[in-house]
Structure formats: structure tokens, C-alpha cells
């Protein structure tokens, strides 16, 4: 088997049911031919850089998988026939990948997703504490001038 990634763009006006149908059909082609799906990422509706088949937007789907070359040929044949697809691009990432390599790739993607989620959670916590920290800083700024003048007055009275 070889390691591939395919990105394809669907017409944006299809609806969630048809998006799911096309994605599941594509996944079935890979798994029925003995391949393995490593990752499916629905990027959603994005603005296109230029119009394709009179569409200004498209629904992007990214698929990372391991399969035989005949499987890729079949997927691309189906994509050429289907009018609901605007564009597709398949890239070969590696000439050979075994089951252990597939499992390793799945683990890497899961680790990246967990790290991204941790960063997002940290940023959310910082934003929440940042608002509270700003309020505390405002209060200390209001009280600091009073505290600074008080010790200075105390030193002047000692002299």
C-alpha cells in the first residue's frame, strides 16, 4: 500500500446530507479495496480564490489514507463523473506504508489534535484570567499613587 492525501471541493449548496453521502462513499471505496483511512477533516465552506464552475465558495474535505494505486484511480474516476465535485487533488506521500505505519500516522494525528486542543484551552483560560487580571491591575493602578504619596509624606515629616 501507499500513503496518500486527497483534498476535494464540493459544491456548497448541496446540504449536509449530500456532503456526508459523498464522504462516506469515498471512504467506502478506500476501505473496500483493503485500504485504511488515517484521517478525515471537514474544513467546511471556504471562499475560493477564483470561480470554479460558476461557484465562488466550496465545501473542502481533506482525506489522509493508505491504499493501492488502483483505489486512487477509482476514486478519481468517480470524482470526474460526479458533477457535485468542483475540484480534487491527490498527492502520494510515501511509496510504501504498512499497518504499523498506518497506526503510527493515526497516533501522530491524534497527538497533534490533543496538543492543539490543549493550546486552545490554555488560550481560553488566559483570556478569562486576562480579563480578571486587567481588573486587578486597574484597581492597583488606582491605589498605587495613594501608596506612593503616603510613604513620601511620611519621609518628609521625619525631616
Image: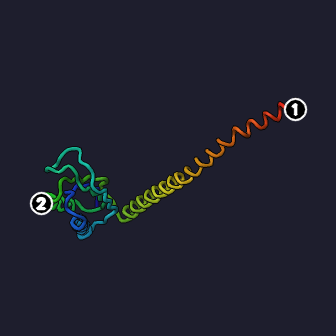
Q: Which residue lies most toward the right here? A: 159
Residue beneath the point at 25% across and 49% down: 47
Q: Which residue is mark 1?
A: 158
Specify few, some or many for label 2: CA neighbours under 10 Å numbering under 14, 14-19, or 20 or more. Answer: few
> What x and y, as percent, mark residue 65?
30, 61
Residue 109 horizontal/vertical position (percent): 40, 59
Q: Total of numbered circles in the picture?
A: 2
Q: In the depicted view, which residue is nearer to us: 125 or 6?
A: 125
Residue 145 appears left or right of 98 = right
Read off the residue under disc 2: 81
Q: Position of residue 117 (x, y in %)?
A: 46, 58
Relative to 29, say whether 145 is above or below.
above
From this viewpoint, is residue 46 visible? yes
**Where's residue 35, x and y in %?**
28, 66
The residue at 17%/62% (across/down) is 74
Would residue 4 be seen by someone viewing this image from the given angle? no
Residue 100 position by quadrant: bottom left
Q: Residue furthest bottom?
A: 32
Amino acid at each position: 500500500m501507499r500513503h496518500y492525501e486527497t483534498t476535494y471541493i464540493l459544491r456548497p449548496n448541496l446540504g449536509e446530507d449530500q456532503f456526508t453521502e459523498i464522504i462516506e462513499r469515498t471512504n467506502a471505496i478506500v476501505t473496500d479495496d483493503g485500504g485504511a483511512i488515517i484521517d478525515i477533516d471537514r474544513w467546511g465552506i471556504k471562499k475560493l480564490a477564483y470561480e470554479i464552475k460558476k461557484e465562488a465558495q466550496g465545501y473542502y474535505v481533506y482525506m489522509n489514507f493508505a491504499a493501492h494505486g488502483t483505489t486512487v484511480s477509482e476514486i478519481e474516476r468517480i470524482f470526474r463523473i460526479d458533477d457535485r465535485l468542483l475540484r480534487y487533488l491527490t498527492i502520494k506521500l510515501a511509496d510504501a506504508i504498512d499497518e504499523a505505519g498506518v497506526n503510527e500516522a493515526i497516533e501522530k494525528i491524534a497527538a497533534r489534535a490533543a496538543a492543539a486542543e490543549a493550546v486552545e484551552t490554555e488560550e481560553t483560560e488566559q483570556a478569562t484570567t486576562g480579563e480578571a487580571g486587567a481588573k486587578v491591575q486597574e484597581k492597583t493602578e488606582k491605589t498605587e499613587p495613594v501608596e506612593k504619596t503616603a510613604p513620601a509624606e511620611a519621609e518628609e515629616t521625619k525631616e
